[in-house]
Image (cartoon, grey):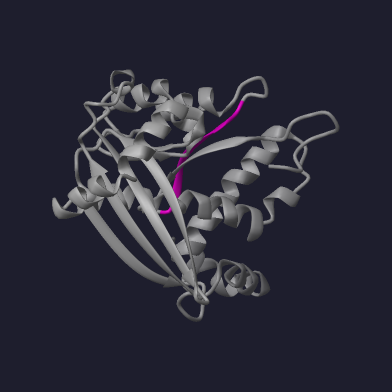
């Protein structure tokens, strides 16, 4: 919350557990000013029930202690790999980008491809997943580590093409539907952050009291969840327009909103 600070101070930094399936916040934790996300995530996981659920976390949360916490609470994890786990990242990257390995995974059904049109461009996503990880030197360091995976994304727009690759470690067994849903579904938490910043202009809010600012953050997340479900005038109306329409005549829409 960028504007929630005085000179020399730090703004509230809030970790959120977001349900992609239901579109609401399961819980949150304010990061201690003398701490960071890595220590705050296990504390948040301790507060919520994740048994039987797949937990996705950005690369910063790809830590052995966090993987162990998720497994201890009987959940599964799909953790993004980047340079903060350099050796593991490089090993997985080299293995999954080997053309012969990709071909083998495609032939054995450990592959899924989707094609979508969005924002004037075509997005092709190819997912690969394998349990062949005995060769990984770091395997024993990660509790419940069962598979590695990759998303290869091709973006085509105006005759041009570019590619993006993302790599993952997971406690999931080979299951292309579940793995691809977990990877693709992680955009939901990014969408939540985007709406808080853009639709609700949270970063511009100058509430300095830390507790008050956190309370307002919770209220915004409630409102976001309601706005996702409620339909005003026509389907697919943007969040910003829904807020505007309701604010112009709250008496007309209050009962409809409260029903959610």
The residue at 47%/36% (across/down) is 82
Q: Is residue 78 visible?
A: no
Image coordinates of residue 1 in percent, x first then y, are 68, 42
Image coordinates of residue 97 in percent, x first then y, are 34, 45
The residue at 83%/28% (across/down) is 8
Number of callouts in the render? 0
Secondary structure mainly formed by the magenta segment: strand
The residue at 21%/26% (across/down) is 134
| Stretch of the chain drawn in magenta | 23-31
Q: Which part of the image, by quadrant, shows the C terminus? A: bottom left
Q: Is residue 59 above or below residue 254?
A: above
Image coordinates of residue 226 in percent, x first then y, are 49, 59
Q: Nearer the viewer, residue 238 or 130?
A: 130
User: Is 225 situated left or right of 33 in this image?
Assistant: left
> Would residue 26 be counted in the magenta stretch?
yes
Q: Is residue 209 above or below residue 198?
A: above
Q: Is residue 36 visible?
A: yes
The residue at 46%/54% (across/down) is 164
Image coordinates of residue 41 in percent, x first then y, are 48, 29
User: Is 96 situated left or right of 249 in this image?
Assistant: left
Residue 13 in which image quadrant: top right
* Extreme residue toward the bottom, this view: 233
> Would residue 191 be counted in the magenta stretch?
no
Q: Nearer the viewer, residue 186 or 203?
A: 186
* Extreme residue toward the right, this view: 7
Residue 249 in which image quadrant: bottom right
Q: Is residue 82 above or below residue 223?
A: above
Q: Is residue 26 above or below residue 231?
A: above
């Amino acid at each position: 919350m960028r504007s929630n600070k005085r000179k020399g101070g730090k703004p509230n930094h809030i970790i959120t557990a977001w349900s992609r399936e239901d579109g609401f916040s399961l819980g949150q934790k304010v990061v201690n000013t003398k701490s960071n996300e890595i220590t705050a995530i296990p504390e948040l996981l301790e507060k919520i029930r994740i048994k039987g659920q797949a937990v996705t976390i950005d690369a910063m949360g790809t830590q052995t202690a966090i993987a162990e916490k998720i497994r201890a609470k009987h959940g599964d994890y799909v953790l993004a790999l980047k340079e903060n786990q350099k050796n593991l990242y490089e090993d997985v990257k080299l293995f999954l980008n080997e053309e012969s390995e990709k071909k083998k995974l495609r032939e054995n059904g450990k592959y899924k491809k989707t094609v979508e049109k969005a924002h004037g461009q075509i997005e092709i996503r190819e997912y690969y997943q394998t349990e062949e990880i005995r060769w990984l030197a770091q395997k024993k360091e990660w509790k419940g580590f069962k598979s590695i995976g990759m998303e290869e994304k091709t973006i085509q727009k105006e005759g041009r093409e570019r590619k993006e690759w993302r790599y993952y470690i997971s406690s999931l067994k080979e299951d292309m539907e579940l793995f691809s849903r977990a990877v693709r579904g992680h955009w939901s938490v990014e969408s939540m952050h985007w709406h808080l910043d853009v639709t609700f202009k949270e970063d511009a809010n100058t509430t300095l009291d830390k507790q008050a600012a956190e309370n307002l953050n919770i209220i915004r997340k409630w409102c976001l969840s309601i706005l996702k479900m409620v339909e005003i005038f026509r389907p697919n109306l943007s969040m910003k327009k829904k807020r505007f329409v309701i604010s112009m005549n709250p008496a007309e829409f209050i009962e409809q909103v409260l029903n959610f």
